[in-house]
Every structure is written in C-alpha cells, then in structure tokens.
Image (cartoon, grey):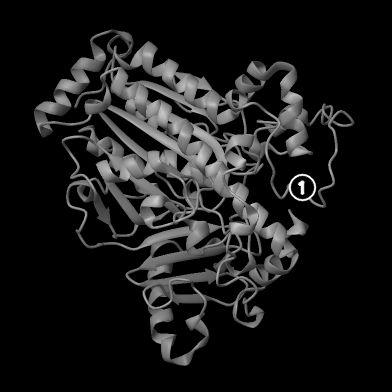
Amino acid sequence: MPRLSRKQFLGASAAPLALQAAQSRTGKRPRNVLYLLSDQHRPAALGCAGNAIAQTPTLDGLARDGVRFTSAYCPYPVCTPSRASMLTGRYAHSTGVFNNATPWPLRIKTMAHYFGARGYATGLIGKMHFVDAQTHGFDYRLDFNDWFQYLGPKAKLYADELAKPNSGSGNPQIDALWKDFGDPWKAVRTADNREGLVHVGRASLLEERDHFESFVARESIRFLRNFGTKEPFFLISSYLKPHDPFMPPPEWAARFRAENMPLPPTWGKLDATRVPKVIAASARAHAATPELRDPALARQRIAMYYANIAFLDHALAGVLAALRELNLHEDTLVLYSSDHGEMLAEHGLWQKNQFYEPSCGVPLLFRAPGMIAPGAVCHTPVSQVGLAATLLDACGLPVPDGLDEPSFAHLLKNPTTPATRPVFAEYALGTPQARYMIRSGDWKYNLWVNDMPELYNLRNDPGESRNLALEPEHAATAARLREQLLAWHRPSELRA
C-alpha cells in the first residue's frame, strides 16, 4: 500500500481509503481496534479460567465470544519495559527500556504510528507509564494528570492511599516533574500505620465514580461517541487496577472476605537452596509490604486484589456496552490483556519481577465478530511482543519490517495450530541480576547471568516447584534450551 500524504492523513477520505484497500485484499476485516489493558492481572484470575474466586463476568463474556489464550507472556515483568515492548513490537534489549525510570526512545515507532499512518484515529486513555511527556504517535491522550484535575481537592484521598510518591500508580505520573523541588505532598498526606511502601489493602475512601477505572471508562466512552462512528479508530483504554493500591470502592471490597481466601499450595514451601538468591531473598523479606509475613494479612491482600479485579471488570462492562449502543460491536476487534501478572503469595512471593507463570504470564482475550470462532481456547504460547504485528495483520494493514516478533493472527482463526517458535522474556537488564527466559513446548528455562539456572516442566509441574536444572538427568534439556535462548539473543552481560 503506498504511503499516505499528510493531506490524505488529515482528510476525511483517508480512513475509508485505507479501510477499503485492506478489505479488498483480505475480505471481511475489523474496522476498529479497542485494546482494554490492565496492570498486574495474573493469568489465572479469571472466572473463565476456572477460578472460583474471581468475579469477572465481562471478561468471561469476551472469552465466550472470542478466543482465550492460556499461555500468553509479557516480555518483561514490570510496567514500563513491558509496555514499551508491547507497543513497539521490540524486546527491551532492542528498545533500551530496562526499568520504570527509562524514557522510551523518541524515534522508535509504536502501534499508534502504524495505525495513524493508515488513517485511524488513535487514542490512549489511562495509564501507559511513558516516564516523560512523549505521546508516541497517539492523536488523543488522557492520563493520570487529567484524572487528578478531575478529582480536584479529592486528589488528597488518593495521595493518602499511596502514602508516598509512586509513579507506578500515577503520583507523580512523570518522576522528573518533582525532581527540582521535591514531593509537593510531603507533610500534607495523612499517614497510616503501614510498615512499608504499600498498604495491605482496604476499602477506598474515594467514591466509585471517582476511581481511575471509572474515569478511564467514561473518557473511553466519550472517545467512542466523538470519533468512533466517524472514522476507523485504534483506542487503548488502559486501567491501573488490579495494581496497588489494593483499595477498591467499599461495595466491591465487601464482596471478598479475607477469611475466605485460601493461601496458595506453595505458600511457605520455597526451598531457598534450589532457587536463585534474589527469589529466596524476596520470599523472606516482603520488602514493599512487610505485614504479609502474617497469613491473616496475606489473606486480606489476596481478598482486596480480587476486589480490584471485580471492580475493573465492572468498569470494562460499560465500555463494551457503549460499543453495542453505538453500533460498533460488529466492526471492532476487542482484546484484553495486562502488562504483567502478580505472584499473589505463590512461593511466598508478591508483586511481579519473576518468570514464574503468575508474574510473567498474562491474560489474553480476543473478540472479533465474523473473524473468530466463539469460545475458542488457544494453548499455543505467544508473546505480547507479537501484538503490534498481530493487530495490524488482523486489520489487513501492512506489518512493517524490523519488528522482533511476527504476527500470530492466524491463531485467531485456527487456535489449535501448534507453536512454531519459542517465547522469550527478559528482566533486570544491565544489572547483576539480569535474567532471560525461554518457553518451548512444555519446558521453561531461565538463564540468570550471575546465579543458578532454572528449568521447569510446565505439564508435570505447573506450579514450578521443582527446579530440574539442578538434576543431572535433565542437563541435556537445559543445555539445549540455553543454546536456543543464546541464539535468539546473547546477553551483553555474558560477553565480557
């Protein structure tokens, strides 16, 4: 397809031209893309995944109407690098975004650039953790700072919930804004009795309508009303929950009682001699929330995590209802995923940062009426790095050269197709704790640059409780996977 001129891009005819060209080549294709994105949603925390605790009727409905991926992985289990890789289609070792303080490179293109160049109205409403003020190709952008303006004086309630600066939760949204003069909330927040940075979890003092999820849902609906019926759109509607603070509105907090929350089977059973030192230390310390050494408080945190998910699901329902109301449902590819998972006490660990399934795995659901067979389940492992190519491909648009992962759009139509390539992930690049993951078939191998490797058979040991890398009979498998991983990318930490 020839490159569109600026006049075509800005003109009313650009979108229909791009759409007609795509449809003439490929038949029926989605006209629009709605990407519902959350933060820290572990893959098993869905009713449609068989989780009896999770209250997710909206997401379960998406799964019934489309395809659910059971082995989807984030590329880097922490916010900023994972999102950078997801939106650009490039791994962190390509983008250079290694942590939550690194701005995304200015010249690396995102999904928004690719869709926008084909005449789509591009919107990003909610969290993306860009670190600085770049818009990365989005025409329309609302984020935490716009929410704080909406809250006005009520922003103090949220500052109190965080207790200290936490840009991962949006305050500040851009760290650099506070570097010159310090934290403007210092000595203004109302302190509580937490031991660390993160509260165990409780009901929020914010009204339901004032939560970030309610704001993002409302503004996403406004975008759909203002632009969705006029031209093709690519909209990312991006939410903070279930990420901390684990403080849902009271109605939602009351649905989940701590005493009803089971601790996972691996709680308190981590063998520190068979895992890397960083993992063992994390299981001992619970640094962000020291109170979680108490099983009763651990259950309270689990309860509020599920309450956060239930409230998020409620917010998503309103956006999907607006699609139907505006007659956009049949023409819109909808997907739901998260930037990484949450350990939620598995192995005694919390938050993300690990290659274990609850942390590196993510939920991934697609719905595209007329394109996807309803109720399909795909067990083929996939990486979110492939989402950029997949969404373009699914819409019949050209996939640019230079992306690190190809499209897996063929799995939307044929979800039983077996894997043809491994899935990779990386973490803590440029540090002594750098590590890399490869998932190939039933096997997962984790290469730690300065610690013991890990090898798990996910079919026989889905809880990843037995590190087979330490057993001689599995040495050949570990060596084969290590060789595959290094053929994909040889870490700079190993080149010295």
Looking at the picture, how far across and down is residue 80, in whole percent?
Answer: 56, 42
Q: Is residue 193 left or right of residue 171?
A: right
Near mark 1 (Cα within 10 A), the count class, few <14, some 14-19 or many ≥20, is: some
- Residue 401 can be seen in this image: no
Looking at the picture, how far across and down is residue 407, in whole percent?
Answer: 27, 46
Q: Residue at x 81, y 48 (%)?
A: 194
Looking at the picture, how far across and down is residue 229, in whole percent?
Answer: 29, 14
Q: Give the position of the N terminus as an image quadrant.
A: top left
Q: Is residue 398 left or right of residue 129?
A: left
Image height check: is 149 above or below 94?
above
Image height check: is 418 above or below 19?
below
The residue under label 1 is 197
Q: Residue at x 24, y 36 (%)?
A: 368
Q: Is residue 409 left or right of residue 341?
A: left
- Figure quadrant of residue 322: top left
Q: Residue at x 73, y 27 (%)?
A: 177
Is 251 or 349 nearer to us in this picture?
251
Is 303 or 470 nearer to us in this picture?
303
Is 380 or 470 nearer to us in this picture?
380
